[in-house]
Amino acid sequence: MAIIKQNAIHSAKSPDFRNLGICLRILVVANLMGLFASLAATSTLADWLPGFTRWCAFMQPVLLASLLALYALQPWLARLGAVGGYAIALWLPAAFSLLAHMVAVHALDFDLPGGPMRSIMLAAGIASITLAYLQLRQRALSPAVTEARLQALQARIRPHFLFNSINAVLSIVRSDSKRAETALMDMADLFRVLMADNRELVPLAQELALCRQYLALEKLRLENRLSIDWQVDEMPPDALIPPLILQPLLENAIYHGIEPLDEGGSVSIQLSSTRDELHIRLRNPYQPGSGHHQGNRMAIGNIRERLQLHFDAEASLNISQDGNEYAVHIVIPYRKRTAS
């Protein structure tokens, strides 16, 4: 139990204030709180609209200025960690609220109810509730939960993969010892990554190298039944993605798409970037009505949750089935690791 709590503490981090989805959620939550607060402060609906208008005239500049400041400070906040990031995110709205109160009262001669402390407490209260909501949402999508689901899926697939891979290595250990040694090293690297702490984003090139090792093992087992169509010439190798995004898709493409077919098939992998987006496309054969294919949904759901955790509304995962082809298309923002 103590280990779980410790992992939860280490996995906590301040929100990404450069993420469009996070900014939209902050705007919606803050304005909803203003709406309910103005409703509670008035006795009739006729009095509510003027009160809400005054609230918007005062708080919207504070809210927008705070978001702009947090956007500019995001690289620094990321290095501060969760405690420092949340402290700054709480302090900035209060400071901007005090500034807005002083400008409204002394420069614009507005009659604001209460003193500057009321404005500070109002901004701090809204910021606290908004940050608490974001933290609860992060915990709901935390890697501790989603990785547990991924492990539950892999626990069923991994013994099957491990057993067949060992048999494939044994079949060539005498005839091609060098190839057998390479295969065993690939297996060791693959399982080392699967058992590692996979919370942070990794370069796309690192994920691709892992996928090549995995596919080499599957190729050893399936031989001519499996072919791979690599389309990675336009791939940005420094793009950051959640780890184990592409490899489980390939595992499912082979397990649910290639293995049920006597003649096998081809898996197409296309990685490219357009403007500020990274596109991951994967296609494999699909046999309609095959119960062997239904287990794919769990891995897809897990990947979708982890994309939401890291990129919120800026990422998407779409699935299409066209005849005998199953396709997955992932779009994530193109991000590179910033220098410390």
Image: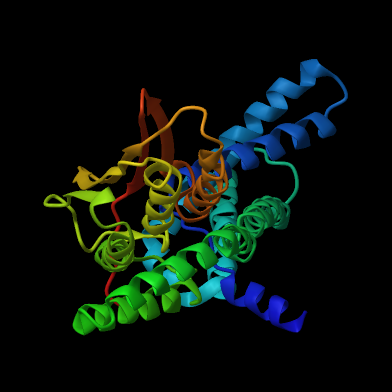
Is residue 316 found left or right of 213 in the rendered image?
Answer: right
Residue located at (57% from left, 56% from top)? 93
Is residue 19 found left or right of 50 in the rendered image?
Answer: left
Q: Position of residue 298 (x, y in %)?
A: 57, 47
Q: Position of residue 159 (x, y in %)?
A: 54, 67
Residue located at (24% from left, 65% from top)? 205
What colour-coding does the image apply?
rainbow
- Which of these two is toward me, 304 or 308? 304
Whether residue 109 is visible to the viewer of this picture, yes or no, is no
Q: How many marks?
A: 0
Q: Position of residue 29 (x, y in %)?
A: 64, 41
Assign the N terminus to one quadrant of the image: bottom right
Residue located at (37% from left, 55% from top)? 246
User: Is residue 136 depicted above or below 161 in this figure?
Assistant: above
Residue located at (70% from left, 21% from top)? 49
User: Is residue 285 depicted above or below 212 in this figure?
Assistant: above
Whether residue 318 is visible to the viewer of this picture, yes or no, is yes
- Which of these two is toward me, 269 or 302? 269
Assign the C terminus to one quadrant of the image: bottom left
